[in-house]
Image (spheres, coloured by chain):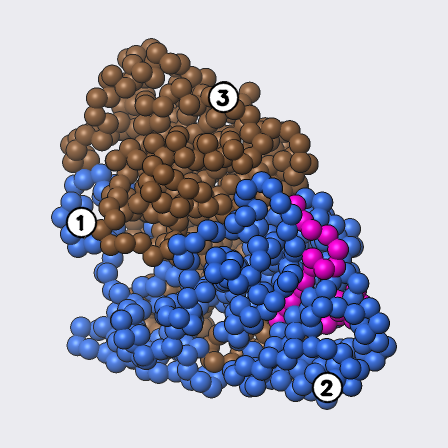
Chain colours: A brown, B blue
C-alpha cells in the first residue's frame, strides 16, 4: 500500500475492505495493519536486503541458492530496535529461492508474500531482473492459456490431472499445433514446470521473439501412482502401489503417456499428428522417462531432450536402472529421430551418467547434441535447458 | 515417506532422486533428510495436534480460525527434547487456516506443506473431513477444467487474466452452457475463489450430486488497475491509477465485465446467450460490484448473489458508496430479474448494510432471498453461500 493512500484509510470503507483481505487469524477478519517491513528489498545495483523484526531472537541466518555449497548461510545483524538486516549481492539476474533460520527453526521470510513450492517445501522468491532472467518474467507479450485438465488413464487405473499450455495463436480458434510433452523430476508433480520452471513465461517469450514455434506444451504428473499433486488429488487407497518416486522404474508412466495422454491430447486439442509433431523432454526422473520413451517408443516422437540424467552406474545407484540398454539403443538406432539432446551441468551428481549416455550414443554412431552447462542439478539449469531446447523443435 | 521404504534409500538411486526434490537451500541440491515431524496430525476423533521442534524458543503459540475472537491464540507446551506440542479440538469438519507465533515472529508450521495465500499472506491449512466439508474435498467424481486465460480489456486498457472453469460435460466437445461470473473481495485477486473458495471442488461435487447444472464459472480479477495477481502480472507503469482496492468504486470493473469479459467468454466458449443464461455473484467488494451490476446493467444478468455486502452507511464507511441508490433501484425494478440473493453472517461487520439492502428491496416491493448465517466476514461463510447459490441458477 502506498503511503499517499494511508490517510484515507481511517474510518473509511477502505478499513472495511482491508478487513476483507480476510487475514484468517481469527474467526472473523477485522481491520488489521502490520508493520510494513520490506523484505527482500531489491536495489537497482542488484543488491538485495533481507529484514526481519525479531527482538528476542539470538541468531538469524539466511540460506539461498545464490550461495555455493550445501548448508551455506549468512548471518543477519540485529540493531537496537530488534530489526535484523543483511544485504547480499549484487546478484546476477535469476530467480532465487531462500529461507531464514531463526534460532534453529527454518522459516519463510514473513515479509515476502512471493513463495514457491518445491516438493513438500516452500521457499521465498527473489526475482532479480536482467537480460539472463528476462525470459522468466511476465512480459507485455501475447500469453498462452494454462489449463488444469483431468483425463482418464486406463493404463494406471486412475483419473489423472495434467497442465496443458496452449500458445497465443491457439486462441484464434483455427490452425493445428505440434505438442511438446515436458516431464518433471522425482519428488515433483505436474505443478513443477509451470511454477519453478516458469514454462509458460519461457514459452510466451520465446514465441513472441520468434525463437520458438507456437506449440502446445503438456505437463503431466510423472508419478504413476498419483492422480494429481498432493493437495488436489482425491483420497487414495492405502497400499495402492507405485507411490511417489517409488514407481518411477516401473515403465508404467511411460506407457500411460503414450497410451492415455497422447490420445487424449490429440482427441481434444487441435494438434498436428505424427511423430514429427511430438517432442518429449524431462529433468532427472523425467530425463530417465525421456530416455525410456526414446528406447521403447521411438516411433512416437521425433525430438528427445534428456536433462540432468544419463546412463547411471550400478555402483552409484545401487542397481541397474537401464537393463538391456544395448538392445534398446539398437531399437532407437533402427527407428531414427530428428533430435536427441542431452543437457547436464558439470557439477551435477549425474554428470558422469550423462557422459555415459553420450559415450553410448557415440559407440552406436547415433547423432545427438550435448550441452554441458556450469552448475548442478538445479532449476537454474533446467530453465536454461528449456529455453534452449524449445527453439529446436518442429523446425 | 514411509518407514518401510527407508531401508532402500541408502546408496540407491532413491538417494539421488530425493536430491531431485531439489531442496533449494544451496546452489546444488544434494541428498538431505530432515526430521519427520508430523504437524498437523488429524486423528479420527477430529482432534488436531500441532508440533514444532524449537529447543531454544521461549514461547510458541498457534492462532487458527477455529478460535473465536481477534488475536486469540493457544500456547504449545515444550518437552525436554525441545519439541513443542498442542492438541486442539475436536474440530467441526471445515477447512481451517492457522499460523504459529515463535517468540513474537509469526511463521508457518514448518512441517505442513499445505498452505494457502490470502491476499499477501500465507497460512497453513488443516482440512477436517466430514459431511459439512465434503463439498470442498476433491472427490472421485468427474472434474471440470480450470484455465488461466488472458483477454483484452479495452475498457481498462490492459491485457488481463482470469480463471475459467468449464464443467465436466464441456469436455465432450458439444453442447452449450450458461455462465456464472464469480467475484472476489478487496485485497484478493483472480486466484481467490479457486484456492480459498474451493470453487472447482464445490462445482464438481454439486454437479456430480445433480444439485447444480453444468455451467461455466468465470473468476475475474476485480481490481480494475491490475492485469493479474501480483506475481503473474507484467510490470506496470507507476501512477497508472486505479490500483488495487482503490479503484473499486470507479465502476470501471463492472463496465469491463460487461463490455470486455462477457464478449470474450461468449466468443471463445460454447455458451448459451441471453440474460437468462448469465449469473453474477461476489463477496464483500465483489458484492458491491454485484449490486452495481444489478443496478446499472440489469438487462445483462438474470441472477444476482450479494455475499457479505449491502447498502453501507456513510457514518460507518466515511462516504456514500451507493450514490443515487433510489433511482438505480428503480432501474432494477423496471427491468426485472429471476433471482436476487443476499447472504450475510449475523456477526459480519457489514450485517447492518445487508439489512439496509433487504429493507430497500422490501420498500420497493422487489423480490429477493435473504440468507442469514452465523459467523462473520469469512471464507467459511463464502464457501457455504456458493454451495447454496449455485444450485439455484439457470433452473
Label 2 crowding class (10 Å Cα cut-off): few <14, some 14-19, many 20+?
some
Which residue is label 3 attached to? A274
Residue A315 image-quadrant placement: top left
First reached walking from the N terminus: tag 2 or tag 1: 1
Q: Residue furthest bottom?
A: B315
Residue B29 in view in this figure: no
Residue at the location (57% across, 54% down)?
B214
Quadrant containing the N terminus of chain A in the rendered view: bottom right
Is label 2 in a helix, a strand or a loop?
helix
Badge nearest the viewer, 2 or 1:
2
Q: Nearer the viewer, residue A386 or B212?
A: B212
Q: Position of residue B40 (x, y in %)?
A: 31, 69
Label 3 crowding class (10 Å Cα cut-off): few <14, some 14-19, many 20+?
few
Residue at the location (36% across, 45% down)?
A158
Q: Nearer the viewer, residue A191 or B281?
A: B281
**Which label is found at residue B5?**
1
Which residue is label 2 attached to? B359
The residues bearing labels 3 and 2 have C-alpha atoms spaced at a distance of 65 Å
Pinpoint the chain carrying mark 2: B
Horizontally, residue B373 falls left or right of residue A234, namely right
Pinpoint the chain carrying mark 3: A
Is label 3 in a helix, a strand or a loop?
loop
The answer to whether marks 2 and 1 sit on the same chain is yes
* Part of the protein shown in magenta: B269-297
The residues bearing labels 2 and 1 have C-alpha atoms spaced at a distance of 64 Å
The answer to whether marks 1 and 3 sit on the same chain is no
Q: Nearer the viewer, residue A63 or A231?
A: A231
Q: Position of residue B198 (x, y in %)?
A: 50, 62
Badge nearest the viewer, 3 or 2:
2
Amino acid at each position: 500500500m502506498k503511503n499517499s493512500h494511508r490517510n484515507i484509510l481511517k474510518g473509511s470503507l477502505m478499513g472495511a475492505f482491508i478487513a476483507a483481505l480476510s487475514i484468517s487469524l481469527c474467526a472473523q477478519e477485522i481491520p488489521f495493519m502490520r508493520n510494513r517491513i520490506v523484505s527482500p528489498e531489491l536495489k537497482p545495483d542488484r543488491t538485495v536486503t533481507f529484514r526481519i523484526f525479531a527482538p528476542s531472537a539470538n541468531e538469524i541466518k539466511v540460506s539461498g541458492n545464490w550461495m555455493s555449497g550445501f548448508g551455506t548461510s549468512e548471518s543477519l545483524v540485529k540493531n537496537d530496535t530488534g530489526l535484523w538486516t543483511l544485504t547480499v549481492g549484487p546478484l546476477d539476474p535469476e530467480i532465487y529461492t531462500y529461507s531464514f533460520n531463526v534460532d534453529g527453526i527454518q522459516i519463510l521470510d514473513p515479509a515476502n508474500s512471493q513463495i514457491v513450492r518445491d516438493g513438500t517445501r516452500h521457499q521465498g522468491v527473489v526475482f532479480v531482473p536482467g537480460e539472463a532472467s528476462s525470459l522468466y518474467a511476465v512480459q507485455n507479450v501475447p500469453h498462452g492459456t494454462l489449463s488444469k485438465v483431468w483425463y482418464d488413464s486406463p493404463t494406471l487405473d486412475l483419473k489423472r490431472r495434467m497442465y496443458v499450455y496452449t500458445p497465443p495463436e491457439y486462441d484464434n480458434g483455427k490452425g493445428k499445433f505440434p505438442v511438446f510433452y515436458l516431464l518433471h523430476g522425482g519428488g515433483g508433480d505436474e505443478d513443477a514446470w509451470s511454477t519453478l520452471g516458469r514454462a509458460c513465461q519461457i514459452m510466451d517469450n520465446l514465441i513472441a521473439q520468434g525463437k520458438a514455434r507456437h506449440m502446445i506444451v503438456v505437463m503431466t504428473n510423472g508419478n504413476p501412482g498419483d492422480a494429481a499433486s498432493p493437495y488436489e488429488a482425491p483420497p487414495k487407497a492405502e497400499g495402492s502401489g507405485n507411490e511417489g518416486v517409488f514407481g518411477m522404474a516401473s515403465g508404467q508412466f511411460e506407457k500411460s503417456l503414450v497410451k492415455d495422454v497422447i490420445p487424449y491430447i490429440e482427441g481434444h486439442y487441435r494438434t498436428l499428428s505424427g511423430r514429427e509433431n511430438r517432442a518429449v523432454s524431462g529433468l532427472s526422473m523425467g530425463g530417465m522417462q525421456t530416455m525410456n520413451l526414446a528406447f521403447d517408443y521411438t516411433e512416437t516422437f521425433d525430438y528427445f531432450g534428456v536433462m540432468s540424467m544419463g546412463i547411471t552406474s550400478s555402483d552409484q545407484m545401487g542397481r541397474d536402472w537401464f537393463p538391456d540398454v544395448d538392445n534398446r539403443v539398437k531399437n532407437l538406432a533402427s527407428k531414427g529421430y530428428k533430435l536427441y539432446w542431452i543437457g547436464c551441468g558439470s557439477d551435477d551428481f549425474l554428470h558422469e551418467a550423462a557422459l555415459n549416455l553420450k559415450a553410448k550414443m557415440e559407440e552406436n554412431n547415433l547423432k545427438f547434441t550435448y550441452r554441458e552447462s556450469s552448475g548442478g542439478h538445479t532449476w537454474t539449469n533446467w530453465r536454461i535447458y528449456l529455453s534452449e531446447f524449445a527453439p529446436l523443435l518442429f523446425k
